[in-house]
Image: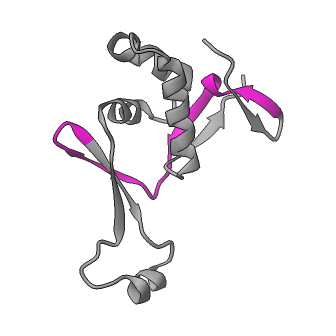
Amino acid sequence: MGGYNMETPEGKVSLLDAVPVRCGHITAEWKGECIVLAYPRFKYEWMRRFLLPKGMSPDIHVTLEEHGTAVWNLIDGKRTVREIISLLADHFGKEEHYESRVTAYVMQLRKDGFIQLTIQRN
């Protein structure tokens, strides 16, 4: 597996050894064969009360495609990115640049605030 690294206060560590953890403000529900993630449109309740137009959902919804749904289902706060890639390899592993796709997706989930990445210290 490739050399995907991320910066931490302790220095560079392999992204493959990081453990994705879902953020508590994110909810997930099934819609057909895909998962829909929802997160609050506003951080504070007073903002929602005063700034949310009538009839608009207080949450933003994001529908994950098949690949995203599969990755999200395996994010349990215990598995590393490497383990997630390995578990999905039978289904998606034949795709070109599969490992890169998963790591890029995990980094995007982190950037968008859906997950945090933790490093397990031995």
Location of residue 51 with respect to 32 vertically, above or below: below
In this rendering, position of residue 119 left or right of residue 98: right
Magenta stretch: helix, strand or loop mostly: strand
Location of residue 108 with respect to 45 vertically, above or below: above
* Residue at point 51%, 30% (across, down): 78
User: Would residue 79 be visible to someone looking at this image?
Assistant: no
Residue sticking out furthest to the front: 96
Location of the C terminus by quadrant is: top right
Location of residue 7 with respect to 97 vertically, above or below: below
Q: Quadrant of residue 9?
A: top right
* Residue at point 54%, 23% (across, down): 100
User: Does the magenta-highlighted stretch encompass residue 16?
Assistant: yes
In this rendering, position of residue 45 left or right of residue 58: right
User: Does the magenta-highlighted stretch encompass residue 45?
Assistant: no
| Colour scheme in use | one colour
Residue range highlighted in magenta: 11-34
The spot of residue 40 in percent (x, y) is 42, 66
In this rendering, position of residue 17 left or right of residue 109: right
The spot of residue 101 in percent (x, y) is 49, 26
* Residue at point 69%, 18% (across, down): 3
